Amino acid sequence: MNEWTPSQQADREASVVTPEHVQLRFQTAGLGSRAAAQLIDTGILLLVNITVFVLFSIVVLDRNEFWLEEMKDFAIALLLLFLFIVNAGYFFFLEAFWTGQTVGKRLMKIRVIRDNGQPITFLSAAIRNLFRLIDAIPSGYFLGALVSFFHPQDKRIGDLVAGTIVVSENEQGKMSRKQRSMQNQAIGLPLLLEDRQRQAITREDWQLLSTFITRLDSLSKEKRRELGDQIAARFVKKLEWSDHKSVEQDPIAFLQRLYWQLQKDWQLGGKS
């Protein structure tokens, strides 16, 4: 059973316990990073709107051909419909098909995920962005910002209804010296995977693996071994890995090699 338990720390952490009894911790994205991402996305939409309007004016409004005069009202209606789809669909389509990120969120290293720690779905992205209309009341996302400020997991109304949360990925991008050494060792000993094995890895699998690897330094030796055995067994079964003996001897090394091999596929800018 999945459950969220908010941390009492000032930086607002949230954790989820997976069905495998592995606890994953996420730092929620605060108002600052979310506002910055929103400004970036708004700026992009503004540029798109201005560019489209200028091009439309040059191609249609500034020309006096007879057939264009007859079509101007229809063309204006099409323009308004196009701009509505672009502005209304920007956040929804990017979050739904870009694993919970827009351009602004990617630049600010934040991402929308579901309450159970899994990637956002088409439906939850639709619900979340539909409620932007309410979060924007009376203007400038005032109501959404107010709710987010007082919520222990920085959720706005859309997040509450859709069952989503915005988390920071800054920690995922930082590596300790020890982890850099692990990476160097892994590069020297690549874990060769067939295409069918790569395809067997889901986003949920990658999230579990990457969170475990990037949190190794914070785990005790006993907890590291316990979780390593559980997670390695999961991937051995999923990949139909034949070398059981080496995995049992050092499950952590197996998971590290697997992580660095899959990183290019699944890190920011990879699979969606």
Image (cartoon, grey):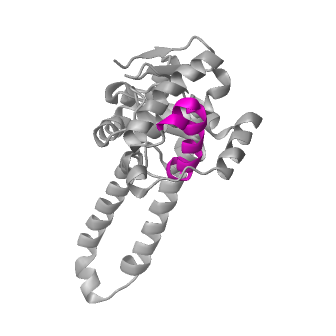
Q: Position of residue 245 (x, y in %)?
A: 51, 35
Q: Locate the N terminus by quadrant.
A: top left
Looking at the image, which is closer to me, 18 or 7? 18
Residue 138 visible at all: no
Location of residue 126 by image quarter:
top left
Answer left or right for 159 relative to 216: left
Answer left or right for 268 relative to 81: right
Location of residue 174 by image quarter:
top right
Q: Is residue 154 above or below residue 207?
A: above
Q: Residue at x 41, y 57 (%)?
A: 195
Answer left or right for 32 relative to 23: right
Quick check: is 30 in the magenta stretch? no
Looking at the image, which is closer to me, 197 or 53? 197
Q: Residue at x 32, y 62 (%)?
A: 82
Q: Residue at x 47, y 21 (%)?
A: 22
Q: Position of residue 169 (x, y in %)?
A: 58, 36
Q: Residue furthest bottom?
A: 65
Answer left or right for 36 relative to 162: right
Looking at the image, which is closer to me, 60 or 40? 40
Q: Position of residue 167 (x, y in %)?
A: 52, 32
Quick check: is 247 in the magenta stretch? yes
Q: Residue furthest top?
A: 8
What predominant SS class does the magenta segment belong to?
Answer: helix
Q: Is residue 196 above or below residue 205?
A: below
Provide the residue span drawn in magenta: 244-268
